[in-house]
Amino acid sequence: MDRDGSISTTAFRPDDAVAVPAGPAFSVPVPNLQIDTAAVLVRIDKPHSVTVASEARLTQNAAFEDGALASTIFLAMVVGMLAMPLLFDTMFFIVLREKFVLLHAGMTIAMATYVMTAGGVISAFIALPIDVLARIPALVWAIGVGFGALFIAGFVEKGVYKDGERKLLRLLAAWTMIVPGFAALQLEATQSFDNQLYFYAFMPIIPALVAMIALAVWRGSRGARFLAVAWTPVVLASIDRLLKGMGVYAASDSIDLWLFFALAFEVLVVALAIADRFLALRRERDVALSEARTLEELSERDALTGLLNRRVIEERFEFLRAEGFTTLALIDLDHFKVVNDEHGHLAGDAVLKCVAAALRGDDDNMLAFRIGGEEFALLLRGENGLERAEQRRIAITPKIAEVRPVPDMITASMGVVEAPADTLSDASFEALYSRADRLLYQAKASGRDRTMAERLKVFRPRRMQEPRRAA
């Protein structure tokens, strides 16, 4: 408008606008100012977003406006902060294999995309059309909030939420992604109401999510405490953005920088929450593995003597033979029934414990087992297996002598089979046990307190004679 009241006009369409890297904005060039220009009037015709209309302003150079460079650097730092939790999520998922880690990664990607597009950072690298740039932030925000609702449902500890409450969170996630997500597409047929639909659709979501987090905190959820700290700044900034989007009031877009900061703060705190959960789950799994190992060990051990039981030697016999345990010795106490009959089963149990102590030792090349009743077994590897087994048998009698009130000398008989790795005979547990058992009863039949042994034949290939040379 010139001083004489004449007006010259220029009209622009969205395709004429240029995205500004220094914020969630685009620019169009106003006519050149003349000496007699009195004013520049700008009309935004049918603005889709009240927020965009309220933040429009005249400037000499949008890219170099005061604070633009600082805002761009700040937003780039926020994007970098959002990238770090993605690395953590990757590492945590490799270890935990928990679905909520993937949900947090999806939420983080959505929020990083929001910051890059709504903050204008992406325009410094990619020239996106204005209509596309207008749709992406609203769409990824709806998707990110949906992922957030799913994350709450999966992250809060089991037993905190009832099945119906977790289902409610999933329904909120579906609502957020579908209804505001549809409005964010800004279809031609929905231009008249999709902006209002987008913001009004969020109205029940925010209090519902706040209520669900508060409920989990009230029920003692440790994870929910992290979420409460992380989401409080985001909720406050989102409410401000929601009210501005609905046209309740207008304000400077500087408040949006706090929304971006709140998003970065939220993602980092939640990453710490996942790390805390990782440590908790690892402790739980360590305890579970320890208990499992304890139970497995108890199932492999004889309750009275603490020796390995028959099931272990049967199940692992082939492996132990492959490890070099090629000598099997069966030991049976002589006249043990007399101990139980004359002195009681407590005395009998004490005798069996003494036998176990005599057999156990600290030799890694000798394993002791309780087969059942007063029958024991030794598996030996290395040289002089028979002699070493005999030393253990002889050690039984003086050890039992320590038991009171057992006056009689208790002895032991033993049958030993040495089955080298290249033996010609069947070397299965059943076969060797049968041979050792037969030798044991031969020892008993020969007067007890002695050992009978045999060594199985091995394959010895005949040496090939060198052919004689013709004279």
Image: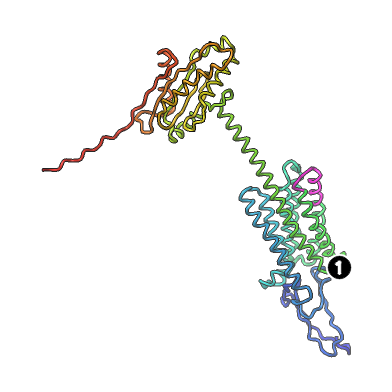
Splitting the image into 4 quarters, where does residue 295 fall? Answer: top right
Confirm whether the magenta stretch covers residue 214. yes
Tell me: 4 left or right of 78.
Answer: right
Residue bearing mark 1: 250
Q: Which residues are magenta?
A: 209-224
Q: Main secondary structure of the magenta part?
A: helix
As drawn, 1 above or below 288: below
Residue 439 spot, x, y in % from top left: 40, 19
Quarter of the image with the C terminus in it: top left
Question: How many labels were placed on the picture?
Answer: 1
Residue 427 spot, x, y in % from top left: 40, 29
Quarter of the image with the N terminus in it: bottom right
Tell me: 160 left or right of 361.
Answer: right
Q: Which residue occupies the extreme top position in the image? A: 342
Nearest to the observer: residue 25 or residue 393? 393
Residue 214 spot, x, y in % from top left: 81, 48
Tell me: 326 left or right of 174.
Answer: left
As drawn, 216 above or below 248: above
Amino acid carrying label 1: it is Ala
Confirm whether the magenta stretch covers residue 357. no
Nearest to the observer: residue 71 or residue 162? 71
As drawn, 337 above or below 100: above
Which residue is rendered at x = 85% and y = 68% of the image?
Answer: 251
Nearest to the observer: residue 86 or residue 191? 86
Nearest to the observer: residue 351 or residue 254? 351
Which residue is rendered at x = 46% and y = 35% of the image?
Answer: 319
Residue 93 spot, x, y in % from top left: 63, 51
